[in-house]
Amino acid sequence: MAAERSAARRARPTTPAVDRPPLGALEGQHPETGALELDQLIHERVRLGIVSALAVNGSLTFTDLRDLLGTTDGNLSAHARRLEDAGYVLCKKSFEGRTPRTDYALTALGRRALASYLDHMEAIIRATREG
């Protein structure tokens, strides 16, 4: 039975590739709004929450961010690492006595990326309301 399914899968005709613009062609100006394309790194819900919270508060501890966003330790850690790797967030690890402490702050690059993201979202809202 499994061999028949496997043979059927191999026998399926392949569909032609869909015409897609090259990956780099998606960057730049949005044709209708003139705004920059959405920064997919920031667009994800938890990462948007992280950069927004840091923009408002200056810096926050890991625990403060986790509690504010209502996420798990692992989820917050993974998303914060992506932002850190992109240079949007600065992570500082220290100890208070024997207790580890992780502080996060938004970098200048992260602040500019958030501002561009918000500008684009505002442009989409304007275009949607006008259309």
Image (spheres, helix red, strand yellow):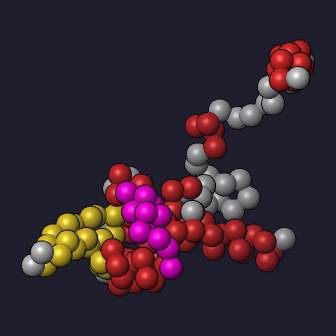
Quick check: 93 left or right of 84?
left
Identify the residue at image location x=51%, y=62%.
42
Vertical arrangement, residue 1 with respect to residue 117, above or below: above
Vertical arrangement, residue 112 with respect to residue 125, above or below: above
* Residue 81 figure quarter: bottom left
Asked if the stretch drawn in magenta spans residue 79, the answer is yes
The residue nearer to you, when weighing 111 against 119, is 111
- Residue stretch in magenta: 70-81
Identify the residue at image location x=58%, y=48%.
28
The residue nearer to you, when weighing 127 against 14, is 14
Question: Residue 84: x and y, percent?
Answer: 34, 57
The residue nearer to you, when weighing 35 against 24, is 24
Identify the residue at image location x=64%, y=59%.
34
Quick check: 101 left or right of 95?
right
Asked if the stretch drawn in magenta spans residue 97, the answer is no
Question: Residue 85: x and y, percent?
Answer: 35, 52
Which image quadrant: the C terminus? bottom right
- Which residue is the extreme one toward the front? 1
Whether residue 16 is visible to the viewer of this picture, yes or no, is no
Question: Residue 50: x and y, percent?
Answer: 44, 72
* Residue 80 figure quarter: bottom left
